[in-house]
Image (cartoon, coloured by chain):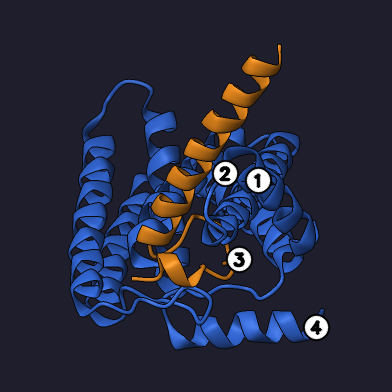
């Protein structure tokens, strides 16, 4: 059970890093509010 | 939601997966982007559904997402102002589009043609529009986003032309066309300096 939980956490991290990269690569992510982009993702 | 909550969740994920500390900011950013946009999307669709213009609202959201993705635009400083504005603007555009689509064909043609011209001009003159929170640093990236913006507006104009010649389900096709055209005009307006002042004014009311 614990193994499944940790693999889900791992998949969530991969998905979130993908979202962060897609969102920072675009000029805007649909909405009218833009959160602060982290320095490491600024291009 | 509080930014600290995103940070705490990101910190937990980083610890569990033994990631470097800088990834914590990226995870928190992704969570903020996802949660705010999903919440916005659901509330906007709900308002569209309650007003009886759900298909038009879906079209408006899709067009705005595609256009703003590459062209950018003015933003609110507060997520709550953004949520309120999104919930009002897109269903309103859908409502207006549905109403105008029921009128004479010439009206929808004029709106579609105006949207195409306004969209191309706005991209030529302003796109891509960045913000202090997400600056476009690289000139190459700026050029690329401008090029992609032309591609997106080209696809949207082509879609409007195809909808013009569709003869079956005529009213639905025209409704989609007018909703898309009105959304193009709204997003194009958001590229201007006037829109930046408008959002600033809204922020100051908060």
Q: Are marks 2 and 1 on the same chain?
A: yes
Q: CA distance from mark 3 to mark 1?
A: 29 Å
Q: CA distance from mark 4 to mark 1?
A: 40 Å
Q: Quadrant of residue B162?
A: top left
Q: Residues within 10 Å of mark 4 (few under 14, many from 20)?
A: few
Name the residue beneath numbered marker 3: A33
Instruction: Indicate which label's residue lies in the foreground, 4 or 1.
Output: 1
Which of the labelled discs sits on residue B15, or is there none?
Answer: 1
Q: Can you say whether B146 is above or below B39 in the image?
A: below
Q: CA distance from mark 3 to mark 2?
A: 31 Å
Residue B19: image location, x then y, percent = 54, 48
Measuring 63% from the left and 73% from the top, which residue is drawn there?
B76
Residue B63: image location, x then y, percent = 41, 49
Which of the labelled discs sits on residue B205, or is there none?
Answer: 4
Q: Are marks 3 and 1 on the same chain?
A: no
Kindly indicate whether the residue at mark 2 contacts the one at mark 4 (C-beta within 8 angstroms).
no
Q: CA distance from mark 4 to mark 2?
A: 43 Å
Instruction: Indicate which label's residue lies in the foreground, 3 or 2.
Output: 2
Kindly indicate whether the residue at mark 1 contacts the one at mark 4 (C-beta within 8 angstroms).
no
In terms of secondary structure, where does tag 4 sit? helix
Q: Residues within 10 Å of mark 2 (few under 14, many from 20)?
A: few
Which of the labelled discs sits on residue B18, or is there none?
Answer: 2
The quadrant in which the N terminus of chain B is found is: bottom right
Q: Colour of chain A?
A: orange
Mark 3 belongs to which subunit?
Answer: A
Kindly indicate whether the residue at mark 1 contacts the one at mark 3 (C-beta within 8 angstroms).
no
Chain painted in blue in the figure: B
């Amino acid at each position: 059970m614990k193994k499944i939980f940790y693999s889900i956490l791992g998949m969530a991290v991969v998905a979130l890093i993908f979202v962060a990269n897609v969102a920072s690569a675009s000029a805007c992510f649909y909405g009218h509010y833009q959160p602060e982009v982290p320095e490491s993702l600024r291009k | 939601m509080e930014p600290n909550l995103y940070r705490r969740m990101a910190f937990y994920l980083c610890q569990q997966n033994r990631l470097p500390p800088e990834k914590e900011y990226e995870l928190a950013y992704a969570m903020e982007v996802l949660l705010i946009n999903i919440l916005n999307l659901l509330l906007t669709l709900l308002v569209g559904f309650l007003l009886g213009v759900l298909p038009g609202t879906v079209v408006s959201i899709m067009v705005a997402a595609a256009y703003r993705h590459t062209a950018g635009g003015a933003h609110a400083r507060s997520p709550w102002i953004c949520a309120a504005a999104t919930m009002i603007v897109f269903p309103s555009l859908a409502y207006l589009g549905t109403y105008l689509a029921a009128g004479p064909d010439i009206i929808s043609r004029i709106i579609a043609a105006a949207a195409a011209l306004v969209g191309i001009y706005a991209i030529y003159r302003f796109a891509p529009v960045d913000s202090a929170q997400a600056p476009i640093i690289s000139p190459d990236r700026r050029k690329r986003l401008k090029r992609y913006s032309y591609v997106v507006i080209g696809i949207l104009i082509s879609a409007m032309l195809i909808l013009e010649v569709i003869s079956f389900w005529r009213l639905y096709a025209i409704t989609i066309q007018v909703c898309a055209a009105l959304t193009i005009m709204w997003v194009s307006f958001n590229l201007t300096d006037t829109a930046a002042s408008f959002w600033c004014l809204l922020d100051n009311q908060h």
